Image (cartoon, grey):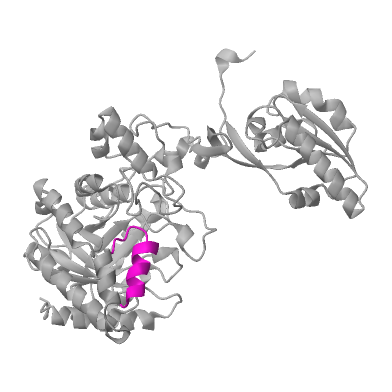
Amino acid sequence: MIVGEQKSIAEIKAIIAPYKKILIMGCGTCVKTCFAGGEDEVAVLASALRLACKKDGKDIEIEEFTVERQCENEFIQEGAPAIARNEGVLSLACGAGVQAVARRFANTPVLPGVNTTFIGVLEKQGVFTEECSGCGNCGLAVFGGICPVTRCAKKLLNGPCGGSQNGKCEVNPETDCAWQLIIDRLKTLGQMDNLRIYVAPKNWQTSLSGGPRKMVREDHMI
Amino acid sequence: MSEKPISRLQEILTKGEFAVTAECGPPRGANPGIVRKKGEMLNGYVDAVNVTDNQTAIVRMSSIAACAHLLHMGLEPVMQLVVRDRNRIALQSDIMGAYSLGIRNILCLSGDHQSFGSQPDALNVFDIDSMNLIRTVQTMRDDGKDMSGFELNDPPRMFIGAAANPFADPFEYRVIRLAKKIDAGADFIQTQCIYNMDRFKEWIKMAREEGLTEKVYILGGVTPLKSAGMAKFMNNKVAGMDVPDALIKRMAGVPKDKAVEEGLKICQETIAELRDIKGVHGVHIMAIEWEDIVGKIVKEAGLTPRP
């Protein structure tokens, strides 16, 4: 899923400062799962902002509306009447959602209320970890299913650096060394020979380096 | 590789002499005088001088420029090159540029992560890794081609170095990594500072058993300790460093005004042991911001005059 984190109240207050009528628009997919921008978070944020603005003596009307997915037009359109009633939209979706809404409402400022952080997994309740960079050229087959492009701070493809100690990364002792994980897993799988393979320089053309990417599925086009 | 040695360092190693290299950190500024001063301190005591490339991710004068200053003094540099700050285009370009200036030794490294440096908000590059860099320099030299396969006009011919850290984890992988670096094209290896001699010996034994010490020249790294505090700091705060408790206790056991002397004594003992280990071909002295001590270390080790 796409993992995001709500911006601080102070930053959100500054972002919405020019507006008197604002719609907080939630998204019921990824950001709901990571407690950043689902219906519940929209309600909590709206209350907090109303209170904070009242305390500041600022007159503001805040409306709440959550759609299933802000990255799909079909769902975005459900919010059209609410968007029309407000001066601006504070989107609690990921960056893609913010832009998808903005694209469809040319005259309404659409503002981000969430920092999109990464593509990750729910490791355990309340803990999300980044596992994929969306590089467009998946090499997990040789790495025992653990991605060094994402999970090694130096994106090393040919083994751990000299800073791997006790299974942890030198950059952050809270982070597992991706290469320790890879080696442990390859050992379990009986694929230690993979470690001797020279992994050639990665072709980054499929990544964001090649510019924003587009996927066309002609078989699904109408 | 061709018969004629590429550099003096290669010539010395090929002849089977015990090589001596030392490290020289460029200044945080544009004054070439500081590089020359450090060069003067090392002149006559070492076969080649490693010039670091923005080590610990602190911005300094470029390695390539500091190498050029040393070359003008008649010293032979080993240009360190990290993949942290440059993509493959810049790396290959700098390798050609360095060769054009007369630089003949290169040490291919990943580089310390920027979060340890003075500008942790920097974007890192890591387009290719150190293994890929070694292979790139080798391909340039032996095939005369850049990474795209383009045939270069007068390709750079470098004597290729790489790093090894026998003290990092997972231990059993460290020799596999060494083998990979050799396969990728490393001619010589400079190791992380050796304090844990037992572990170093175990590592080199494994390397010998795989026949690796016959394929590559290994220079053991040493850094003289100045105090018990430094020993503790290196052990706890410097990534990939292993200073055994016994050594920390030994440093703490002498009066403060004798600590430097004790550190140098330990350093001499390490060098003496290294010279006796089969498969060790030299020593690399990393006296961090203490280059003036290198002459004394080399002299007292009986490693002068240099060939």
Q: Residue furthest bottom?
A: B257
| Residue A94 seen by the camera | yes
Residue B39, image quadrant = bottom left
- Please, is residue B126 above or below residue A184 in the view? below
B129 horizontally vs B297: left or right: right
Pinpoint residue B193: horizontal percent, then vertical percent.
Answer: 26, 65
B201 horizontally vs A30: left or right: left
Asked if the magenta segment contains residue B270, the reply would be no
- Residue at image coords 86%, 29%: A82
Pinpoint residue A194: horizontal percent, then vertical percent.
Answer: 26, 34
| Residue A109 seen by the camera | no
Q: Which corner quadrant holds the C terminus of chain A?
A: top right
- Residue at image coords 52%, 60%: B120
Q: Nearer the viewer, residue A89 or B183?
A: A89
Q: Nearer the viewer, residue B70 or B212?
A: B212
A178 horizontally vs B13: left or right: right
Pinpoint residue B277: horizontal percent, then vertical percent.
Answer: 9, 62
Asked if the magenta segment contains residue B228, the reply would be yes
Q: Which residues are magenta?
A: B225-243
Q: Which corner quadrant holds the N terminus of chain A?
A: top right
Pinpoint residue A143: horizontal percent, then vertical percent.
Answer: 35, 34
- Residue at image coords 31%, 63%: B80
